[in-house]
Image (cartoon, rainbow, N blue to C red):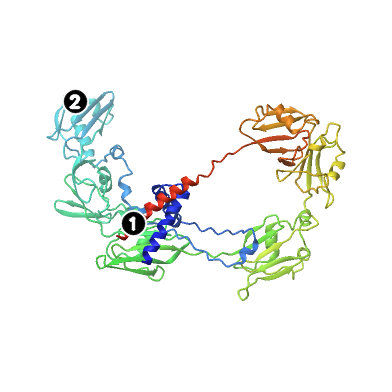
Amino acid sequence: MKIQKVILIQLICFAGTLLFSQLTPKELLIKKRIKTLTEDTNNNRSTISYYNPLPVDYSDSLMVYNSTSNIPIEEEDDLKYYGYDLFSLFPERLIWDNQPPTGDYIIGTGDEVIIEIWGDTQLRAVHIIDQYGKINIDKIGQIYLSGLALKDVKEKLLDKFQKVYSSLKGQETTAFLDISIGKLKSINVTFLGETIAPGIHAIHPYSTIITALMQTGGIDKIGTLRDIQIIRNGKQIISLDIYDYLLKGNAENDVRILEGDILFIPIRYSTNPVSGLVKRPAIYELLPNETLNDIIHFAGGLKANSHQVMKIHRTENQLTSSNTYLVNLKTEPDFILQNGDKIIVYEIAESDHQVYVYGQVKNPGLFGFDTKNETKLLDILTLAGGINDETYLKTMYQDVGEIIRNNPDTDYPEIIKFNISKLISGDTNENKLLQNWDIILIRQNPNYLSPQKVTIEGEVKVPGIYTLQEKWENLEDILKRAGGFTNKAFQDGIQLYRNQNQVALKDFQIVLMDGDSLIIPKHPGVVQISGEVNRPGLVQYDKKKSLKDYIENAGGYTKYADKKNITIIFANGDVRTKKKLFQSEIGEGTTIIVNFEEKYEPFNLTEFTTNIASIITSMATLYLIIIN
């Protein structure tokens, strides 16, 4: 029964909320949902911890703070697989254009042979070796060239052409023969295993393993870079380790591929991400029995600020458990890694070695604390600037400076005092030995403050900037120093501004402050009327006119005017409002504002009662449905 009463009370409260918020139940539910989502967003929003090394209040820096080191650990998803870009960064066209054959190149079907004779005899002929390995030359006939090296082709053709052209014969020939290769024949090579495009491909005849892979798209990321095999006549003749090529420049095993060879890519041996403070974070592949030292070498070595102790995360027993190892590279370089091991290299946490200088120095702020040599007070003050400047030195309070030092044994810091004058004079007792995190405080000379100034503009005899000479100098004093008013000055309209706000003046006895500005205007000769009148604007001033007269001059009230709510702003900034039985005297330069009358609908008790009765009835019906 108690639960049912609680439900009924909650329903009635909910009904009251609906009535007074003027929201439908659906709108309230939407509003509540938006609020919940907003709170969830704010709670889940990541925050940035910012440590300000220069707090405005130097006492803040006395508190020991916990400095959290941001360790730049890259997620595995952000790491690239090392080495695979080699095959995709070099266009296939450049391989064909930049692989000229050498003298030992073997001519075959499809090669284009260019024959040139110059001198007394001129000839240029281009022949493509046919499927039978021959070319047909006018006046000479068919010549079989397939299978010959390029250097041997020249000797054979020279012997044939000497029988036709006598200028090519003898010891003093008058014509010369040159043989070159134009378009080259392609060779057919089979690509198997984890290549991007397995199958038989026609590639450049002078291709090596690497250039062949460049022409066919490279290796899939599940394929190895450490054991690329060439199979010739059913036997493996060589294995290429791309890591040797990339890291050492060793291309000894990057041999030339021949017609009919098989290039085979096995599955990669391992997948080992390396992240953190290494020079080349990436995902690497290890051969069996390769060590932690090997993979750090592959990653370019450690950065200067990296820790020797690194984390190795290992998943074991077919994803049923995992272990974490902390391994010191210096003492355990031969730690054997397994497939899937993740290596994270941490940053060495930096120590904060700082001395703080606050107050009357040229360069207040942080200065380094020397951990290897003694750091003394005079050294730091010289860096902060001012003590070698005779003029600036006068702005410092030289009798007492303070070193504020944290004391781990008490709730309050230790205060060490020193005399700046004696310190500069060479008194070694004043040149205190500093400790890390010391705070040096130099106060300002109270007798060497910047002068306080006010500005006077307008109708005075000598306008300009004036320095305050006395503690209680007032408006009347400054006006006298400015030579008094001109004959055009509107004295009742003097405007005083302080911090960009106009001060409503009562008399000339107000004490001035630094930064005050005075404006002495000319006689305006008008009164301004605005708001709910039929013709807002300016009306000529007449001291005999009343408030009513000025409003009539402005066309009278509009139908929306609140005749009992009129604001009167005098030229000197004073503000008054018109009351029912009070008439203010209107001065020259006054602004009259007739305000808008706000009208409210009367409270309808019958409608209110009907609404609440309807909502309570609905809630009661809902309550009966719930309990039944």
Disc 2: which residue? 164
C-alpha distance separating marks 2 and 1: 66 Å
Disc 1: which residue? 283
Q: Amino acid at mark 1?
A: Ile
**Which tag, 2 or 1, sits closer to the chain's start?**
2
Residue 61 sits in which quadrant?
A: bottom right
Q: Amino acid at mark 2?
A: Val
Residue 328 sits in which quadrant?
A: bottom left
Please state the horizontal and vertical placement of residue 144, each as a whole percent of the image: 14, 34
Q: Nearer the viewer, residue 288 or 358?
A: 358
Please state the horizontal and vertical placement of residue 111, each as a whole percent of the image: 20, 35
How many marks do you count on the picture?
2
The 10 Å Cα crowd at callout 2, few under 14, some 14 to 19, many 20 or more, is few
Please state the horizontal and vertical placement of residue 556, each as a whole percent of the image: 68, 28
Please state the horizontal and vertical placement of residue 617, each as a whole percent of the image: 38, 52
Q: Secondary structure at mark 1?
A: strand
